[in-house]
Amino acid sequence: MNATRDFSGYRWNYPALRWPGDAGLAVSFVLNVEEGAELSLSAGDERNESRHEVNHEVLGAPDLCMESQFEYGARVGYWRITRLLMESGVPLTLNACARALEATPWIASDAAQQGFEVCCHGWRWESHAGMAENEERERIARSVETIHRLHGRAPVGWHTKSSASVNTRRLLVEHGGFLYDSDAYNDDLPYYVQVADRAHLVLPYAFDTNDMRFFDSFAYVRGDDFADYAIDAFECLLRESRDAPRMMSIGLHTRIIGRPGRIGGLAKLLAHIRQSRGAWCATREQIARHWLANVKPGAVS
């Protein structure tokens, strides 16, 4: 067993924290920008991505079907989703791969203009598990430089696709400038971990309140499937937040929820949140800064 795993968590001993506006629940909308960072022989990668609207991998030749499916997110989905969120007054975090922003620099410019946070989703849309330490260190530095150059601000958050490596957090702390990472799925609230000589903040993410389930085993089929599940989660966390703080992550993808047959699910969820009291919609940076300012490491055991 990995001795560093923490099965205890808060054990219902939560910090006495309220979010801004005396809210009990912080809601984080995260839009993943990955188009142009997927595996593609055309981009010089070793193979093609195999999962999009269908599960199929083309071997030994560029997959023009897969590439076109990903392009939809940048060409159409990004605009459809971000304008809906802006109309609803919801702050947004872009989970952006640096190579994706290289391919779509206008997304980085639009994000800067609209005030979206850009969290680094790695250089390429890839897992870091098993990656050599020197290679990962270079990937982090390259990603930060690229986002800073294209967006105008260096990212303060990090989120690896799939699994991080055993070195990722240490390398993020070593690089400096990161307030948090989201490489965890184990809680409904931020928490600190000890990394080298400092307390490092983790903002957990979620795979269930996430539009990827339209692709993953097709757990969601209609837009209402996504909305109804996320609303159930929202209502549960909102009830619990009367007694202790809670956080909810809602994961979106430009090429998934951005399709016309699914976007209504996001609109339904936003309408429900707007008419509810006790929730604070914020970027992940805003959540991290509020936590860092109000909950000190070791304050809760």
Image (cartoon, grey):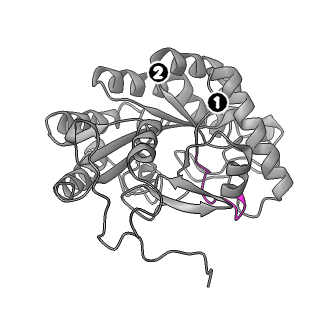
Which label sits on residue 49?
A: none
- What residue do we see at 48% from left, 58% from top? 297
User: In which quadrant of the rendered view does residue 178 lie?
Assistant: top right
| In-image side of 69 versus 48 (left or right) | left
Disc 2 target residue: 115
Residue 254 seen anywhere in this rendered image of the structure: no
Disc 1 secondary structure class: loop
Disc 1 target residue: 154
User: In which quadrant of the rendered view does residue 139 lie?
Assistant: top right
- What residue do we see at 26% from left, 45% from top? 227
The magenta stretch is 158-167
Three-letter amino acid code at the position of disc 2: Gly
Q: Is residue 161 above or below residue 118?
A: below
Proximity of marks 2 and 1: CB atoms separated by less than 8 Å: no
Circle 1 packing at 10 Å, graded few (<14), some (14-19), many (20+), is: many
- What residue do we see at 78% from left, 36% from top? 142
Residue 270 seen anywhere in this rendered image of the structure: yes
Residue 164 colored magenta?
Answer: yes
Residue 101 colored magenta?
Answer: no
Three-letter amino acid code at the position of disc 1: Ala
Q: Nearer the viewer, residue 134 or 64?
A: 134
- Residue 110 position in % (x across, y down): 53, 17
- Residue 163 position in % (x across, y down): 62, 60
